[in-house]
Amino acid sequence: MQTAQRILRGYRRRRLIVCIGLAVLALVLTLSARFVAERKVNEQHFLTFNQRIISTLENILTPLEEVNNALIPLVGLPCENAQLKMREHAARLQTVRTIGLIKDGILYCSSVFGSRNVPINLLQPRLPSALPLLFLSIDRSLLKGTPILLSWVPLANSSNDGVMQIINIELLTGLILEPERPWVSRAVLNVADSHLEYGEGLLQRITIEDGQVSHEMASNRFAFSVTTIGPSPGALALSNLPTQLPLALILSMLIGYIAWLATANRMSFSWEINVGIASREFEVFCQPLVSARNLQCVGVELLLRWNNPRQGWISPDVFIPLAEQQNLIAPLTRYVLDETVRHLDIFPKSCHFHIGLNVAASHFHEGEIITDLRSSWFPAHPLQKLTLELTERDALPDVDHRVVRDLHRMGVDLAIDDFGTGQSSLAYLETLNPNVLKIDKSFTAAIGTDAVNSTVTDIIIALAQRLEIDLVAEGVETPQQAEYLRSHGVNVLQGYLYARPMPLSEFPRWLRGNTRPPRRRGHPVSVVPLR
């Protein structure tokens, strides 16, 4: 059987493990939640950055379509007639570097240079084209070598005539493609098969360094897209996770503390006892009391055993004191009382047969024991005599004497168990008026020795006889002890010499003459009374 310290340590250890586990789980979940939230924020930064670039460029390119409709009719007109309108449109658009009119593949009019006569394919090899085009290129006429975004719109049914608009994209890159660290390390504008990166100019292809990821978003209105390059959202979130650690630690410790408070009852010995009562894990045993004169059974003392499926057999020396500390001794007593009433038929039906029930002094407060007897014992109309046994180590002077008086009036006997082992005054013997004194087994064991307890045994016997109180000797294990007690006037004996504690179901067989000590699963059942 387990010791109280071992069981309590086990409960505290499991409770601590649960609380630490919940705290760690809260820490992991908090950091995980922060990681996921931070990653979503980083992804949103990429998305917002791309959307801003696309929206800006679309706002720039949309007016070009309107201008193209106004410029198309100018193709073929003399340059001196068309240049003023071209300059007006360029000035109004602001982002347009120059506008050119092409006739038969010849750039014949420029909003900047006026009349010209240059084959367009010498300036831009992709032109002229029968299809509208939008592409990145290099300026070869005004600011030579600088990147430009070129828009080409041909005349209907003509591949050699059209309008060319050159956008000063280099100026715009400083406004729309500037990286936004730490989320965006590089931003690239993709038009056709060319790429323009902030600070790098035109690129033939996009390279991505190790540890970097790219996000591309295309315009729904124009033939261009934007690629942003930077650390992955997860890597960024992970790098920022240490900054979330203090708050997560505080939250996890709070969760652990709340769990510690919440498990105070559920993961405590009191909870275990309540589960044991509800699951009927407790078993009532009895130990016979025999007459010293004829060795006939005159009564039993009821004892409680606990076969806990989670802990194994737990000694009454462990669970009874703990139950008293947790104010659960009364429920255990009710359990024994109910089990006894259910098995009344196994006991001799005689008013001279005593059934002893150990009761704590706290059960006497406010007449609680009387209430329990009236609800369980008396409705069964038992013929047997009920004896309530109080141990002297209980606070007997605190017992409500009115309750004791009422018990006597109801025909319930009162016994003081383990008499002589306490430190209380003998004055309460007169106040409590007990019917029986039970001599503790330590005094019985001292019989025939020179120990002081042997002398105390004689004193207790003499005291009981002087006060006309019946005596029961506990712990009788040898014929010499039995003979000494019988010769000194002790009429009732209890101990291994006659019977060990046994389950209630085995008592009838013992009563019929089988005195072999009962065994449980091949092992003798230990003897510790319910207190």
Image (spheres, rainbow, N blue to C red):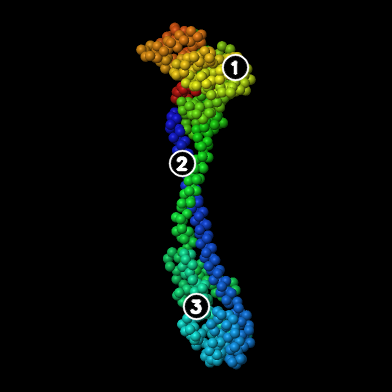
Residue visible at 42% across and 14% down? Answer: 444
188 versus 403 height, above or below: below
Which three-letter amino acid code belongs to the residue tagged 3? Glu
Q: Residue at x 43, y 67 (%)?
A: 209
Percent of width and height locating residue 34: 50, 55
Label drawn at residue 139: none
Side (left or right) of 239 relative to 94? left
Q: Residues within 10 Å of mark 3 (few under 14, many from 20)?
A: some
Q: Secondary structure at mark 3?
A: helix
Q: Mark yes or no: residue 180 visible.
A: yes
Residue 406's image quarter?
A: top right
Q: Residue at x 48, y 46 (%)?
A: 253
Is residue 512 visible to the viewer in this orientation of the structure?
A: no
Q: CA distance from mark 1 to mark 2?
A: 50 Å
State the residue at coordinates (45%, 30%). 4
Q: Secondary structure at mark 2?
A: helix
Check disc 1 and report the residue beneath it: 406
Helix, strand or loop for disc 1: helix
Q: Which residue is mark 2?
A: 17
Q: Position of residue 430 (x, y in %)?
A: 52, 13
Asked if residue 452 lies left or right of residue 474, the reply is: left
- Disc 3 designates what residue? 170
Disc 2 from disc 3: Cα separation = 64 Å
Q: Are marks 1 and 2 in contact (CB under 8 Å)?
A: no
Q: Nearer the viewer, mark 1 or mark 2?
A: 1
Question: Is the residue marked by circle 1 packed among few (<14), some (14-19), or many (20+) residues within 10 Å?
Answer: few
Pinpoint residue 516: horizontal percent, then vertical percent. 47, 18
Q: Earlier in the sequence, mark 1 or mark 3?
A: 3
Residue 178 at x, y percent in the picture = 49, 71
* Direction left: furthest residue: 450
